[in-house]
Amino acid sequence: MKNLLRITCLLVIVLSSITANAFVLRVGLKDGAAEITVSATSYFDLIDMHTNQVILTTYGWRNYRIEAENGGLSVEGVGTFHGPIILVPMSNAFGKVDNQTYRGKLEISRTNGNRILVVNVIDIEQYLYGVLKCEMSDNFPIEALKAQAIIARTFALSNLKKHQDKGYHLCPGVCCQVYKGVSAESKLTAMAVDQSCSFVLSYENNLARTYYYSCCGGKTAPFIWKEDGKTPYLQSKNCPFCKHPRNSSYSWTQRISFYEIQKAFSTGEITSVSIKEYDESGRAKTILICHSGENSIINANKFRTVMGYTRVKSTLFTLHNDGQGVVFNGTGYGHGVGLCQWGARGMAEAGYDFKEILGFYYPGVCLQRIVF
Ligand SMILES: [Zn+2]
Ligand SMILES: [Zn+2]
């Protein structure tokens, strides 16, 4: 099978729409804190960016509390400053906010309502060091981790406007990508970032939509959030790679009582639940709920959201009623669009490299190196 899988093209070109500035990311670590503490793993400077004056040079053993006041930012034992204040660690040191350690610089500013915003100003490659293990286990093979690093880099660069009204590009939560700084780094994930340095996926010279999820359950899903129709690389296809002895989510069973569904969707007394429509991958598209002589049709993804992603792990399921509830027998974990992470692991273990993995899950995309 290996010979049948090829990435469609491998190019090295400059993406003109991305400027050099985009590679210094602004990650909003804290937005709305009443107070914070800062320190570092070694010497650091605090600089008031309003006056460009160094207000403190110290060793990082002690925490300095910073609070927002009407007049500015009060740094415990140092004074009150207009701000923003930037924490610049000396070479090889890392800044800390509330005892969490981050590469790059920490920018602290006062927001409306006397709250504190902390932004981690960081090179995108260093940011990815703190992302990768949060999004894929570092016991996955290096080629799968390299594929994940490329889609995480592409995702970050294509979502720079997500929080622009708040003064930063990305947040550190699941709304963007989970980022935990230095504490989430490992040797293997750092190696995956370094070995895939500056590679992104594109389609027609725009950054590709690099959706991913844990496990497709044997067949990936078609793109369900169609906006512009320019995503032919997000199509349903068979995935023979994710059925892995260690993958506990490949198949799952979940029972949910009629009463719970009735409460969640405010229906009358439920008599039966069934699948009304399927999508082209065999996933449930709509669910029919019969209750008190009436019928309600609910989008299957909404059903999954409301009942909980960890309980209804995917919409690739069959179901049967047991009188008082519904028993779901499903495969896969996640929405199913784009790269299947357990499939990437299976491919890597079968000897495929990251280019072949990406070419399999995003057929027709280009691998490009961003030059800046
Ligand atoms: Zn976000
Ligand atoms: Zn799969």
Image (tube, rainbow, N blue to C red):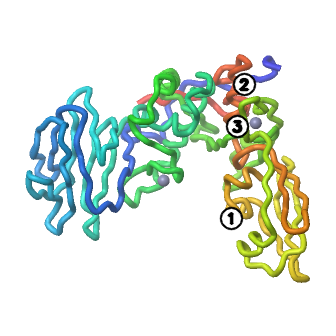
- The residue depicted at 80 percent of the width and 17 percent of the height is 3
Disc 2 from disc 3: Cα separation: 10 Å
Instruction: Identify whether 78 is placed above or below 57.
Output: below
x and y percentages locating residue 369 in the rendered image: 52, 27
Which label sits on residue 210? none
Instruction: Point out the tag, 2 or 1, that comes first from the N-terminus.
Output: 1
Q: Quadrant of the C terminus?
A: top left
The answer to whether the residue bearing label 3 lies less than 8 angstroms from the nearest atom of ligand 2 is yes
Q: What amino acid type should be assigned to the residue bearing mark 3?
A: Cys
Q: Give the CA distance from mark 2 to mark 1.
A: 33 Å
Crowding near the residue tagged with mark 3, few <14, some 14–19, many ≥20 C-alpha atoms within 10 Å: many
The answer to which of 286 and 182 lies nearer the viewer is 182
Count residues near mark 1 (Cα–Cα under 10 Å), then give few for <14, some for 14-19, many for 20+: few
Residue topped by disc 1: 306
Q: Which residue was labeled with disc 3?
A: 340
Kind of residue at badge 2: Met
* Secondary-structure class at tag 2: helix
CA gap between label 1 and label 3 equals: 23 Å
Residue on which the image places disc 2:
347
Q: Residue 121, located in which quarter of the rendered image?
A: top left
